[in-house]
Each structure stands twice: as C-alpha cells, then as structure tokens.
Image (cartoon, rainbow, N blue to C red):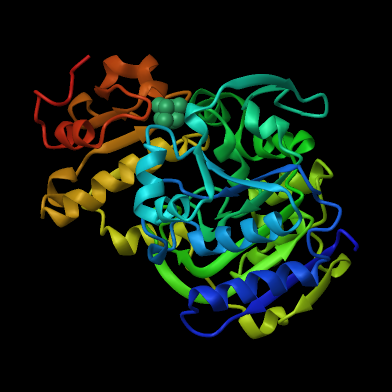
Amino acid sequence: MRQNVVSIVKGPQGPAEQEIDSMVRRAIELVGGLSGIAGPGDTVLIKPNLILAKSPDTGAVTDPRVCKSVANLVKELGARPIIAESSAVGIDTEQAFQVAGYDRLRGEGYEVIDLKKEETVTVPLPKGKSLKEVSFPRVVVEAKAIISVPSMKTHDQPPVTLSLKNMKGVLPDTFKRKFHTTFGIFQGVADLCTAFKPALAVVDGIIAMEGLGPIFGEPVEMDLIIAGRDPVAVDAVTATIMGVEPGEDGTISAATKSRIGISDLSKLQLVGEPIANVQRRFKLAVEAIYETVPLPKGFELLLAEKACTGCRNTVLSVLVDLKEQNQLDRAAGWCVIAGKIDKVPEVERDYLLLAGNCTARFKRRGVFVPGCPPNNRDIAGGILREEQEARWA
Ligand code: SF4
C-alpha cells in the first residue's frame, strides 16, 4: 500500500461504540490495514491526545473508543498495544485518563500508561535541524511502531493540532518546555518525527474542537475518522477539511520541509468520503478570543511566538475566569506578557504583568508572576492586585 493514501470515513450522527469501531476499521483498511506495521510479539504504542482532564464530548481529547478500536486491531496482529500519554506540562495524566474514560479501558484489560512515570533514555536525532538529541520514555523508543491518534482541533499557535503535533505529548515535561523556549515548536516536532515518525495516523474527528483550541474551544460534531500512513498527508487532509490551508500550519509546513511526508493534496490519493462532502470551516483560535472574552478597554495581551501552551492557556483561562466572575473590567489598562520576549513595551509598572519564568529578566519592570507555567490564581491575583497572591519583584 502506498504511503500517500489518506482515507476519510463519515459515520452516523453521534456514533455508538460499535459504529465507531466500524468507522476506525474501515478507515484503516482503506489505507492498507496494519500489515507491515507490526507483527506477532511486537509492541505498538498508541498515542491519544489527552492534553488535560476533559471528557471527549468537549472535543479537547481523543475518544477512548477510537483508541480501543485501534488497540483491538493491533491485538488481532498478535502484537501488544500500549495506550500511552503524557499530558501537558503541570497536568496530572492519571486524572486526564480518569476524566476521559481511559480508566474504563484499563478495567477491560487494555494497557494504559502515564509516560510521565516512565524511565527515559537519551536518543540522538542526527537528521534533526534544531533538535539533535531528545529524552524519550524507554517504552516509546522500544516500541516497534507508534500510532498517533489525535483529536481534530484548532490551536492558538500552529493553527491546528493533529497527528504530528500530538507527538510532542510523548516527551517528558522538561523537554516539552524546551520546545517553546529553545527548539521552536514547529521544527521541534518535525525533528522528533525524523526518528519517531508515526507509522499510522488515525484522527478522531467524532467530536472535534473549533475556536479557542486546544483547550477552551467549542465542540463540533463531525463524525469523522481520517487515517493514513503518512502523518503529514493525514494532517494536510484534515486541515483542509477544517478550512485551513496546509501551508498555513507551522507544524505541517516544517514537517513537509523536513521531508517527513507529503502535504500537497494533488500528490495524495484520497479514498472514502470526498473532502467536499465533509468540509466545514472551523473558527480559528485567533478569531475566537475576542468573541469568547470581550477584552476590556486598554487591555493588551502579548503572547510571545514561542510561549508554550502552558502559559498561553493559563493566561487565557484567567481571562475566561475573570469574565465568569464579572471581574473582567478590572483588567482594563493592563498589559499581560507571557513567553520569551526581547523587550517590554513602555507600560506603567503598575499595569504590566509578566507571566511565567520566561519573562523573569524583566521582572523589575512590572508585576512578575513566577512559575513554569505560572499559577492561574497568581495571575488573577496580580491583575486584581491581591498582593498576597502575586509577588512584587
Ligand atoms: S514560563 Fe511559560 S512559556 Fe516559558 S517555558 Fe514555562 S510554560 Fe513555557
């Protein structure tokens, strides 16, 4: 089976577990099944996206029923499936498993592991451009194959997060941070894939997420499974379904330039449902922020390009919380900065909030909230001028 085949399978509205199983099986069969990916006795790592503790009906995380179906296919080969995740920096993966329903899979005999608890080994990445070596959980390194099973979501940076970006979730937290501060997230993910490219990508598009993804967006029922052996091609097709040009997405572009796979749709063979039948323009994160949180007069939010999801979403969650508490007006006039920056704007010290350790070099210029990522409560406390919670430098 050629690498450049991508399947799109549309299911019934609100598919039940058995229907999801049929969709996943058909999508994988259409791209050649699992033949050649693994055999009897091999270990296959199945990597969902469980960025934090949310249920699959929010669109934020991969539906466990999709992973279960993939795991069953792996078992049918005589191989050993391991469903493995390391949630976002500072998030308890076990709690994410519990809330998303992965505990139930454990109860049914499936192996579900928290990668944050696994032993790590350092692996060289000779073909990496920004990343020359990486620290990986041993279980990932020793797996015969990785199957990336992301949820279909918008993201406030790339602007979509799919099977390629999902690979960042196998890293230990210390390395995840360096992706934002040192390596650059887009090239960092492409470099990871030079050595650990998923052998198969299966996108869970049952309930997707649009708007303020990857966490605070709105669920969108798509009832889709998209699969293929080239994760770049799968992401390019899925992005197109979402109304995003593959070339506009930083991760897909970097992976294409690093020759991880093909994102040019004219060079792909699409099977199953035609794109036009399932396409829906997703609201992007950048379009949604001002609708979700009507920012008060004079409020300015400066998120450095390399600010990671931890800081970005902490700051956004503070704004959402302040709105819910009818306190948003108190953010008027504030300038909030997160991520590594070269200079700070000319803002009165009392109205400049520097969120996270990456802004520490400017900590004397305003209200500095340490942490990596910083605590929501401390940022809110800074804006609300609760001195006991936000520390003055
Ligand atoms: S301070 Fe924020 S932007 Fe900097 S590494 Fe930590 S989480 Fe990422």
Give above or below for 363 relative to 28: above
Residue at the (23%, 34%) spot, across then down = 379
**Quarter of the figure that contains the C terminus:** top left
**Quarter of the figure that contains the N terminus:** bottom right
Residue at the (36%, 17%) spot, across then down = 360
Residue 114: x and y, percent?
A: 48, 36
Residue at the (58%, 24%) spot, across then down = 182
Residue 369: x and y, percent?
A: 26, 25
- Does residue 78 show up? yes
Residue 120: x and y, percent?
A: 60, 22
Give above or below for 382 relative to 243: above
- The number of numbered badges drawn on the structure is 0
Give above or below for 223 relative to 64: below
Left or right: where does residue 228 sit relative to residue 19?
Answer: right
Quarter of the displayed picture in which ligand 1 can be seen = top left
Residue 98: x and y, percent?
A: 36, 49
Pick whichever, 116 or 181, lies toward us: 116
- Does residue 340 show up? no
Instruction: Farthest residue to the right: give it.
Output: 2
Left or right: where does residue 337 sit relative to residue 135?
Answer: left
Pick whichever, 205 or 266, lies toward us: 205
